[in-house]
Image (cartoon, rainbow, N blue to C red):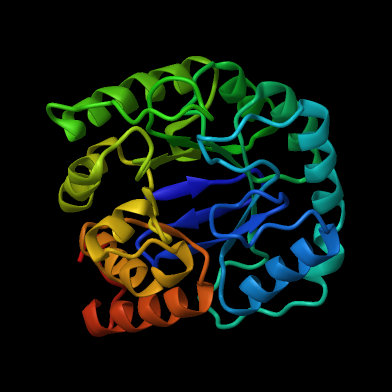
Amino acid sequence: MDWNLPTRMISFPRRPLLMGIVNVNDDSFCGDGTLDVKEALEQAREQIVCGADIIDVGAESARTNRKAIAIEEEVTRFSAFLKGWQEMLAKAQPRDVEQVWPPILSANTWRSEVVEAILPLGVELLNDMGGLSVSRNAELCAQYGTSLLIMHSVGEPKVPHLSQRWDDVMSAMEAFFTEKLETAKKVGLKKEQLIFDPGIDFAKQRDDNLAVYRELSRLHQFGCPIMLPISRKTVIGEVLGIEAPQERDAGTIACLTAGMMQGAQIFRVHNVEAAWQATKVIWELTRSEGSSSDWRL
């Protein structure tokens, strides 16, 4: 399986990729966001040194119980970070030969006005947390050759969907991604430019999230890499009875292990160091001697 970026290609099977999280905002649910761009760039450098293959930068919290910030403010935050990206990279080195280098720059946003402003600034991946609610974002990605990550959810972004119930969340997700794949193709994006995200915790309740982990392999039918957002999620707190997100890293590693067993290719995490160690060990333990591992363990 090949994943096409604007100027390069990543081929699977290979060791799963780690997507580090950098929040240029003051409203992160983990409390790790910052409006200081220099501090955000340093966070990105530290994650890269720990082995991050992708840095996913967001200028607005994805929390659904907060109002959206102004478009102009979001663009300003993104632009300042993106302009400092290359200078920051010059101060970093890859952790090992399997790390993607230079790391992939991902922008986490959903409004097309923001997307149009930031894609020319070197963004390789658009992480559309709005679930491609409008085709414009796909059109912009096709225009700039940008890869597109589509997250499963329902309804408007930034709005809580606590009453959403699913008879069969995986069947609904399969129908959702079938539709989004067709939408992307119609505007000129190739399947090789797409990544699918099952949207853990978004418009899903505890049992829905657990079902996604157990049946994630059903999404391999689409032939696109799967990004699993495992880090410190509410469902982990519900299972363990842990309220503080920062105390859920052990549960996050359990979800990483489950995701690798179901064949996920990318994991979105806060604690890159812990995830890198776990991923490297699991990969070495499970791959066949003398060959790269199958994409599914």
Residue 156 lies, in percent from the top left, at 49, 21
Q: Residue placed at 35% from the left, 62% from the top?
A: 13
Q: Residue placed at 34% from the left, 84% from the top?
A: 281
Residue 254 lies, in percent from the top left, at 27, 70
Q: Is residue 147 above or below residue 26?
A: above
Residue 70 lies, in percent from the top left, at 76, 28
Instruction: Using residue 10 as the reference point, say whether residue 58 is left or right of it.
Output: right
Q: Is residue 241 above or below residue 7?
A: below
Q: Residue placed at 64% from the left, 34% from the top?
A: 145
- The C terminus - image quarter: bottom left
Q: Which of the 4 image quarters holds residue 73?
A: top right
> 43 or 295: nearer the eye?
43
> 125 or 206: nearer the eye?
206
- How many callouts does the rendering have? 0
Instruction: Using residue 239 as the reference point, say whether residue 109 is left or right of it.
Output: right
Q: Residue placed at 82% from the left, 68% from the top?
A: 88
Residue 215 lies, in percent from the top left, at 16, 47
Q: Is residue 28 above or below residue 256?
A: above
Tell me, yes or no, if residue 257 can be seen here.
yes
Tell me, yes or no, if residue 217 can be seen here.
no
> 244 or 98: nearer the eye?
244
Instruction: Using residue 161 as the reference point, say whether residue 285 is left or right of it.
Output: left
> 152 or 157: nearer the eye?
157
Instruction: Using residue 292 as the reference point, say whether residue 67 is left or right of it.
Output: right
